[in-house]
């Protein structure tokens, strides 16, 4: 039977995630997957055991909608201890919502704050879910690209995109995919703009524990006049190598916290109960865990940068997160980034994702690809062998 109905018009501007497409292609081709940002090494044993114990001991039913009380308490305590006094206002019973990953946290935050016709500034390159989340909320995304090679957060360029219809900005630091960690000066410029124009900010701070060369993470909510207008979204998946657990959290003052909780309540009810129990254990890990993780990521970063230099990619050293955005001009390949990425996956056996997938502004990221280095050293070494050989073959043909 043919129906006269059609899918929602909200979906007309959306397309399938290129990141997830590249993972499927990598699986089909047996390629080394440096495209999607998930670790190929196991989470800490303590939290795996805690998850198994929670399942076996009965933590298999709904939790309170906005999260297990013990987990919310530890999230609030973490913010207070790391960023006191600027987060001392956080009450786990009022201001913390545990959700199904940062993706849901971003979507719930925008659906809880944006009205139809509102504009939301998205700073590009940006994760693929930001623009769809704005459109799901009925808003209109407005894109402001950061400019290579330094990808500086230019508040004047952002201000030029703000209109009377602008209600919010989506900001991500440490930044995926550029690897930038925005400085206090850059974030202060954004904060002044938001205060002057009375704008909300939804921040994606999922990589707040993955920084390099001694750089600090600066939550936007800690800057003057920003606590009351910032919705901070974070999560556990990247820090503890449990991206498949889908555990995120939103920290927000009222009335934004209640708005987020309402959307979360009627969309997912609660995050997985036994994994919340395990997450509470994760937040009890000692500081030595983070110190070792930082050292390990420094090693992976340096190894990937060596590999890219040897195999014809020009890359900027990331300051945070676990990605490298690189151009491939030295390959002398005419293909745009999306086709080059598919070719590299199928023919070379190393999966990457096109830089253009992080932009909606035409002409940006077309000759770039993103590498994820949250991988075992042996995985990166295997990628090195394939990339270097392929680049040498290419040079011999030229």
Image (cartoon, rainbow, N blue to C red):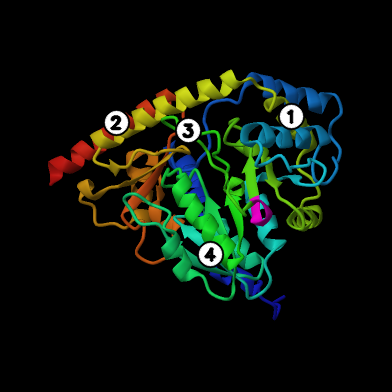
Q: Secondary structure at mark 1?
A: helix
For marks 4 and 1, give the one nearer the viewer: 4
The answer to whether residue 261 is above or below residue 346 is below
For marks 1 and 3, give the one nearer the viewer: 1
The answer to whether residue 156 is above or below residue 388 is below
Is there a contact, CB below 8 Å, between mark 1 and mark 2? no
Of callouts 1 and 2, which one flags the residue occurring earlier in the amino acid sequence? 1
Is there a contact, CB below 8 Å, between mark 3 and mark 2? no
Residue 174 in view here: yes
Of callouts 3 and 2, which one flags the residue occurring earlier in the amino acid sequence? 2
Q: Which residue is mark 3?
A: 374
Q: Which residue is mark 4?
A: 121
Residue 250 left/right relative to 354: right
Is there a contact, CB below 8 Å, between mark 1 and mark 3? no
Residue 294 numbered mark, or none: none
Quadrant containing the N terminus in the rendered view: bottom right
Whole-percent x, y for residue 288 in the image = 57, 18
CA–CA distance in space, label 3 to label 2: 15 Å
Which residues are drawn in magenta?
227-231
CA–CA distance in space, label 1 to label 3: 23 Å
CA–CA distance in space, label 3 to label 4: 29 Å
Q: Residues within 10 Å of mark 4 (few under 14, many from 20)?
A: many
Whole-percent x, y for residue 203 in the image = 59, 51
Q: Which residue is mark 1?
A: 280
Q: Secondary structure at mark 2?
A: helix
Residue 135 left/right relative to 5: left
Q: Which residue is mark 2?
A: 306
Q: Is residue 230 magenta?
A: yes
Q: Residue at x 48, y 39 (%)?
A: 321
Q: Secondary structure at mark 4?
A: strand
- Asked whether 301 or 308 is in front, the reply is 301
- Asked whether 9 or 132 is in front, the reply is 132
């Amino acid at each position: 039977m043919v129906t006269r109905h059609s899918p929602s018009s909200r979906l007309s501007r959306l397309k399938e995630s290129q990141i997830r497409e590249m993972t499927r292609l990598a699986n089909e081709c047996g390629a080394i997957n440096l495209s999607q940002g998930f670790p190929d090494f196991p989470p800490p044993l303590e939290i795996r055991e805690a998850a198994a114990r929670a399942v076996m001991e009965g933590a298999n039913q709904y939790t309170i909608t906005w999260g297990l009380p013990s987990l919310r308490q530890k999230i609030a305590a973490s913010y207070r201890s790391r960023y006191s006094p600027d987060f001392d206002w956080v009450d786990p019973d009022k201001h913390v919502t545990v959700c199904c990953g940062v993706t849901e946290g971003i979507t719930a935050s925008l659906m809880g704050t944006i009205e139809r016709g509102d504009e939301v500034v998205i700073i590009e390159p940006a994760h693929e879910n930001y623009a769809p989340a704005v459109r799901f909320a009925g808003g209109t995304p407005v894109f402001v690209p950061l400019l290579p090679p330094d990808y500086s957060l230019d508040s004047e360029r952002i201000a030029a995109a703000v209109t009377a219809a602008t209600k919010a900005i989506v900001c991500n630091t440490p930044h995926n995919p550029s690897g930038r960690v925005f400085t206090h000066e850059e974030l202060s410029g954004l904060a002044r703009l938001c205060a002057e124009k009375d704008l909300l900010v939804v921040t994606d701070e999922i990589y707040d524990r993955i920084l390099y060369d001694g750089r600090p993470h600066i939550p936007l909510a800690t800057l003057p006049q920003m606590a009351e207008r910032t919705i901070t979204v974070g999560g556990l998946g990247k820090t503890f190598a449990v991206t498949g657990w889908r555990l995120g959290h939103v920290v927000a003052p009222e009335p934004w916290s209640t708005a987020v909780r309402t959307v979360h309540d009627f969309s997912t009810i609660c995050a997985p109960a036994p994994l919340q129990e395990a997450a509470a254990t994760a937040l009890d890990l000692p500081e030595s865990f983070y110190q070792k993780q930082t050292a390990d990521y420094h090693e992976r970063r340096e190894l990937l940068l060596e590999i890219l230099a040897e195999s014809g990619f020009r890359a900027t050293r990331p300051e945070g997160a676990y990605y490298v955005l690189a151009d491939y001009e030295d390959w002398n390949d005419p293909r745009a980034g999306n086709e080059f990425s598919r070719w590299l996956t199928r023919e070379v056996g190393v999966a990457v994702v096109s830089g253009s997938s992080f932009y909606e502004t035409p002409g940006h990221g077309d000759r770039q690809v993103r590498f994820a280095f949250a991988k075992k050293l042996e995985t990166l070494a295997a990628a090195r062998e394939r990339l270097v050989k392929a680049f040498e073959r290419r040079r011999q043909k030229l």
